[in-house]
Amino acid sequence: MLHYLDNSATTRLLPEVSEAMCRTLNETFGNPSSLHPLGVSARALIEEARVKIASALSVNAQEVVFTSGGTESNNMAIFGVATLYAKRGRHIVTSAIEHPSVLEPLSRLASEGFEVDYVLPLRDGSVPADEVLNRIRKDTVLVTMMHVNNEVGSILPVDVVGRGLSDFLPRPVFHVDAVQSFGKYRIKPQEFGIDLLSASAHKIHGPKGTGFLYVRSGLEIPPYIRGGGQERGLRSGTENVHGIVGMAQAVSALGKWDFWGSVKPLRRKIEEGVMRIPGCSIIGPKQEGLYAPHILSLRIEGVRGEVLVRFLGAEGVCVSSGSACHTHRGGPSPVLSALGLKPKEAEEVIRVSLSIDNDESDADAFLSSLEKAVWRLRRVFRG
Amino acid sequence: MVRYMTEIYGNPSSVHAFGRMARKGVEEARESVAALIGASPGEIIFTSGGTEADNLAIKGIAESLSHKGKHIVTSKVEHHAVLHTCEYLEKKGFSVTYLPVDKYGSVSASDVEAALRDDTILVSVMMANNEVGTIQPIAEIVQVAKSRGVLVHTDAVQAVGAVRIDVEELGVDLLSLSGHKIYGPKGVGALYVRKGVKILPVAHGGGHERGKRAGTENVPGIVGLGKAAELAKEEMDSSSEKIKHLRDKLIEGILSRIEHSRLNGHPTNRLPNNVNVSIEYVEGEAMLLSLDQQGVAASSGSACTSGSLEPSHVLTAMGLSHEVAHGSLRMTLGRQNTEEDVDYVLSVLPPIVERLRNMSPLGKRG
């Protein structure tokens, strides 16, 4: 029996999602741009999905642009705004704890002459809104911030920042990477003052290879992928129909669950359990409302995270060391460094991420394997 | 695909067992795709489809070689994924030569040769045209380009799985392909990049696909593409023969039964599944509508440009007048099609044309 506690890396498809996807794959295989019935019914599925997703955000359907995932959405948003407003200004404000799919486009822009201001988090991993707003200048064209951090679970005050930006003229464009929060937290782009919002399907029990970018109507970012002119010309390419259908199905299905009702008690249980293990500490904000309960970052002194992850894996418990997206490059996570952890300390961090799939047995399995692991591994390392 | 959707759902970048199983699925698929086109697995980059692969190839080369030159050679009959990317690069200071084609839609290697300049960094010509099915002389084009040290990209979205392709024999440096044109899923494709050829990424962040294409891999899609590639390799020869026979029967049937009809594209050097005819004195859209009512799903050009009133850029480049281009009809066959499908089309199409011609002011006998 596997205990999957790595839901911020990816999630299992909900049964109703895979059913909807298989139905689409097998029956509605037409190209949505074709005018014959097979094309028309594929198009209808896409537009239905768009309406579902738009209504989850209380926005207009035309403001939802389907993409191949969160990374593409972030790239499209950031490069799009940079291209659109390069003449107006070349200053961008962000936080130092963004996902690589935000940080890397920004460093690319920095090499092209943009100036990027990285707001450092406080020691606990929170990012105060003032710190962001204080950096805004006349030539700031973009503020890009994640809603929930993928490694330590900080909730960033996107609503306060979004509203605060209205005090500036010209008002910078506000992009929010909501990959870890969409479907879990109520987000209203219009109310919050968000112009662009990225989301991904596979973090909410939908399929990999699908995501979307909310683009406020009136914001004319240039196309990201050029070709047949799909997605209002912003993102060409034959639509991933079954993926889009799956994403919309995941949004509606998740809406029927009490996400926090099932996740919060598990977090509490795991927190209480790990506190009993000597040398274990929780990384990230502690104050209610500043952290997202589904992401729990732990440092276990004297045990390397990667070794621990493999040990737990052998016990049938899946967690991660840092985010899945850092495993390609090695080196300590920039997020943990930004929180002030030394490289050696950062290497001792693992991440547990929860979802509606998890129950008490997963928490118990994690805690007992962790205890065993710590006992064994510490002994080994101390020789 | 379903197994990778419901059971092996890990993130391939995760180091735990679930992640590693997903990674294995992705790497096996990479081997299958590589085997289909004679490449090595390390030369395959998975993308979200053919359009992204084309964008990545052209922009990726343009950015990585802009210090060497800013000239690109392509043709007038490319897919919009190539044409619109080239037009974008023109705005960014590149210059692009759009080569003409002959009446069959063929690009000539000598035209490519004449267009090459000292600052040419890339030639991008499609392997086979999506509208009229003409297969381009890529090997010859490569020879010409290679002798001048210029890289060659080919959009092989329509050709992969339909005709044998070996990147070593062809000598191309980059090749785009798509999953859903070879009986695989939508939302996945691949770009072949010859070992040693440097491209800059379009999507940044996370370092997936050797840093060339960031984003969590679409595992079920990639596995589906891998399986489709495997099946294509096994079945291509036999199914192509069958499809080609149906194609020829359909073409001959239409040309012999309908007056003032003509074949678009090359008569022999064409995709085994492509039928594209112009039927004069009728509107393509009206024909499609009538065919639709009779249960025949076809198109008037490419799906991507359907609904637009502009005549096809491919047919226009081949020298067809607007009227003749508007009367064009594309039927593309697949493994699932049978003799009965062809017989059925041949029985319903002539009366449709007859009726439309009688109704239309364009009708010759009106």
Image (cartoon, coloured by chain):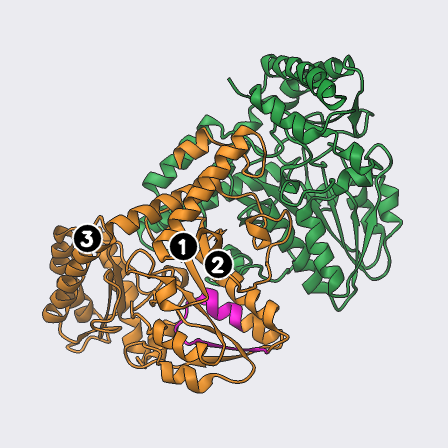
Res. A329 image quadrant = top right
Label 2 packing within 10 angstroms: few (<14), some (14-19), many (20+):
many
Q: Residue at label 3? A: B238
Closer to viewer: mark 1 or mark 3? 3
The verdict on a common chain for dots 1 and 3 is: yes
Task: Say if residue A195 shows up in the picture.
Answer: no
Q: Which of B189 and A217 is in front in this view?
A: B189
Q: Does the magenta stretch include residue B298?
A: no
* Residue B163 in view, yes or no: yes
**Of helix, strand and loop, which one carries label 1?**
strand
Q: Which of marks 2 and 1 is nearer the N terminus?
A: 2
Between marks 2 and 1, how big is the CA–CA gap?
8 Å
Q: Residue type at mark 3?
A: Ser
Q: Mark 1 points at which residue?
A: B178
Q: Residue at 44% x, 78% y: name it.
A: B145
Viewport quadrant of the C terminus of chain B: bottom left
Magenta-tinted stretch: B69-86
3D distance between C-alphas at marks 3 and 2:
28 Å
Kind of residue at disc 1 = Ser
Q: Which mark is residue B53?
A: 2
> Do the numbered discs 2 and 1 sit on residues whose CB atoms are within 8 Å?
yes
The quarter of the image holding the N terminus of chain B is: top left
Check the residue under mark 2 and report the chain it is in.
B
Residue at mark 3: chain: B
Q: The green chain is which one?
A: A
Mark nearer the viewer, 3 or 2: 3
The orange one among the chains is B
The image shows residue A31 at horizontal and vertical percentages of 37, 52
